[in-house]
Amino acid sequence: MNDKILSDLGEALVSGSLTDSELRARTGTMPGRQILPEANVIKIGGQSFIDRGRSAVYPLLDEIKQNLPQHKMIIGTGAGTRARHAYSVGVELGMPTGVLSVLGTFVSMQNARMLHYLLADQGIPFIEPIQFAQLPLYLAERQAVIFFGMPPYTFWQPNPKIGRLPPNRTDTGSWLISETFGARSMIYIKDEDGLYTADPKKDKHAKFINNITVAELKAMDLPDLVVEHSVLDMMENAEHRRSIQIINGLVPGNLTRALNGEPVGTIISAD
């Protein structure tokens, strides 16, 4: 750099303002590094899957074990029905969004710990956000880790446009991991085949959608979505994780097919 301590961009950042839109645009010209390009982020639904208990969870965990030799997995957990109960009580008591986020975080953590104990024979560790710096080591040693899906915003959760429920929950937290680490895939495990035009449990006329873009999905303005709206918003500005896959974990082999790159379930893409 011609004996200069800082590059031209470095000098501009030191002397300029971080609110300057032109300067911020220059920081995006250097491609980001994919830290864990071989890892797959898997989010196991709380209400849609873990709350079903043994009949749903045990076969899925067996499939995870079968895939350990071939695939690295970062496994996140949803919060489920218990979080909804906590939210309802918290809202009635007048708790703000940040406090509600803390309540949801601990329920998601409970689910992660249960899966951790069920996979203890594989030596798969449970990690908290403070341990993510050690995540590459855990993956190299055991091929998988388990974390709770709620992003670590807690009290700093942004307020939603409508109501008080935390807008960034376990779907979003799991997606953020896949984007930040530049993971190979982002797979959501639910109890439905993927995205429908309506909730198939309530509407027998709901139509299955196997492939769609974020723009197309937003234009449809569906009353119910299989993933959080925040995920779609963030995907539009994503650098690495510009697609997600939703599969039915109750169907044996679906997770294996998704890990192998097959277009099972629904794929939502930013482009």
Image (spheres, grey):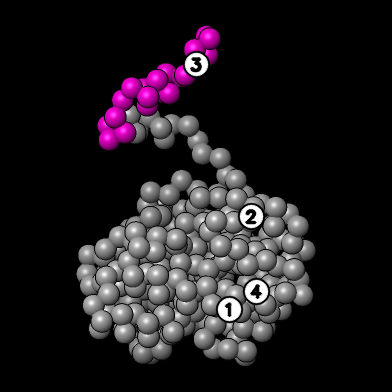
Q: Residues within 10 Å of mark 3 (few under 14, many from 20)?
A: few
The span from disc 2 to disc 3 (Cα, nearest Å) is: 33 Å
Counting residues from the N terminus, which is met first, the one under dot 4 or under dot 2? 4
Q: Position of residue 194 (x, y in %)?
A: 47, 75
Residue matched to label 1 = 249
Q: CA distance from mark 1 to mark 3?
A: 53 Å
Neighbor class of circle 1 (other Cα within 10 Å; few <14, some 14-19, many 20+) is many
The picture places residue 233, in percent across and down from the top left corner, at 34, 57
The kind of residue on which mark 2 rests is Leu
Mark 4, residue position: 116
Numbered tag placed on residue 135 in the rendering: 2
- Identify the image quadrant of residue 224: bottom left
Point out the frontmost of discs 1 and 2: 2
Q: Secondary structure at mark 4?
A: helix
- Closer to the N terminus: mark 1 or mark 2? 2
Above or below — where is 145 with respect to 100? above
* 154 part of magenta stretch: no
Q: Are marks 4 and 1 in contact (CB under 8 Å)?
A: no
The span from disc 4 to disc 1 (Cα, nearest Å) is 18 Å
Magenta stretch bounds: 1-21
Instruction: Check disc 3 and report the residue beneath it.
Output: 5
Q: CA distance from mark 4 to mark 2?
A: 15 Å
Q: Amino acid at mark 3?
A: Ile
User: What type is the residue that disc 1 sits on?
Assistant: Gly
> Helix, strand, or loop for circle 1?
loop
Cβ–Cβ under 8 Å for marks 4 and 2: no
